[in-house]
Image: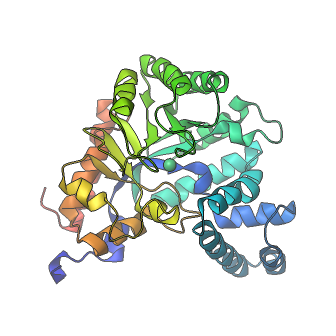
Amino acid sequence: MSTAQTLTAEQILRLPKIVHHEHYDCSIRPGHVLSVGTARDFDIPGEFKAAWRNAGENLQEQAVAAANYQRWLHGHARESLTNYLSILWAQVLPTLQTGDYIYNTAKERIEDAVADGMIFLKLRFAPQLHQREGLKLQQVIDPIQQAVSEAPFPVRLVICALRHENGRLGRRLADAVIRNPLVSSFDLAGDESKFPGVLKWWAKQAKRVSAAGKQVTCHIGEAQAITEQDHADLDAIGCNELGHAIKGDPLGKLCTVCVTSNLVTHMAKSAETHPIDEMYHNGKKVNVDLDGTLLTGTTLSNDYRLIHETFGWTLADFYRCALNGLDHIPLPACEVRKIKTRLDEGYREAGLKI
Ligand SMILES: [Zn+2]
């Protein structure tokens, strides 16, 4: 790479970014989890709870305690997928079970997204995971939708059904997608290795969502290669946006690729061998995406930097991927044009001739 092509961390941070694939519960600030987890004595290692208590009201010491906790979370999560999921289940989700916590953390996430350069964000969540203390499905959706309605840039929500669930719950989730104005999309997430393919009960509900004029996306090709049957099922639903899609041929569908996430969950062995570069150069429709920040210990700007340093991607490469993402924004054309203007301005400022 020549010096002229080297992008600084500051330049990358300022690049406008379009995000389709990010999980709300995987992007919570560590300070929130530690603060609530300590107050309510959740299953968090004692040393971190002690550090938080000792920090008292001192913001600087709180920040150190939160950073140390996140380092541990990241290290523990990357040891195995079982650890990753058990942290989410035992430490993160218990702190997101009241309307206030959900609203506040969604506001914080949106604030952090702005700082990371995002100009469009699709934030996904599984409302059924936030009902441990008695919230009804709509009582989970309302506070997050409220936070989204107050966002300083366009944000939309994605509701996820999980692979181990069933058609009964799937129907309620699909209904929620259809009736909530700021929910744009319906997703299938969860353990692809145990429940591979496009599940029939989900496809039936996804078709209803699609018929109601909303978007459908599906986590696929993360643990298992995408098959011809998968494409036939996805085409029948009208789903042309895939979560990850790093294994098998995504054909012409948008692939929301999350490099660091794939490394942490061992779906890719190393940054150097991650398929994003080959996918991009083979003409696949890649959008550089995030998945989450808390357990991966990354930001989207960090992932851009990793791709830049590993594969030598230039502004033109990132811009081309952003155009793939732009194409898929579930907003009226006039709104998408405004986002395109912001995108172009940011890349011109960085030095790209458009
Ligand atoms: Zn995901």
Looking at the figure, which quarter contains the C terminus?
Answer: bottom left
Horizontal side, residue 248 vs residue 185: left or right: left
Query: How many numbered circles are shown?
Result: 0
Considering only vertical position in the picture, is 121 above or below 51? above
Of residues 15 and 275, the one nearer the viewer is 275
Identified at 33% across, 46% down, the residue is 248
Considering only vertical position in the picture, is 149 above or below 301? above
Looking at the figure, which quarter contains the N terminus?
Answer: bottom left
Horizontal side, residue 344 vs residue 258: left or right: left
Indicate how the structure is coloured in the image.
Answer: rainbow
Identified at 72% across, 33% down, the residue is 139
Answer yes or no: is residue 331 visible.
no
Residue 112, percent across and down? Answer: 53, 60
Q: Quadrant of residue 189?
A: top right
Residue 187, percent across and down? Answer: 50, 35
Considering only vertical position in the picture, is 39 above or below 124? below
Of residues 242 and 131, the one nearer the viewer is 242
Of residues 327 and 120, the one nearer the viewer is 327
Residue 202, percent across and down? Answer: 53, 27
Residue 101, percent across and down? Answer: 73, 50
**Residue ranking furthest to the left:** 353
Answer yes or no: is residue 231 visible.
yes
Q: Quadrant of residue 313?
A: bottom left
Identified at 63% across, 60% down, the residue is 84
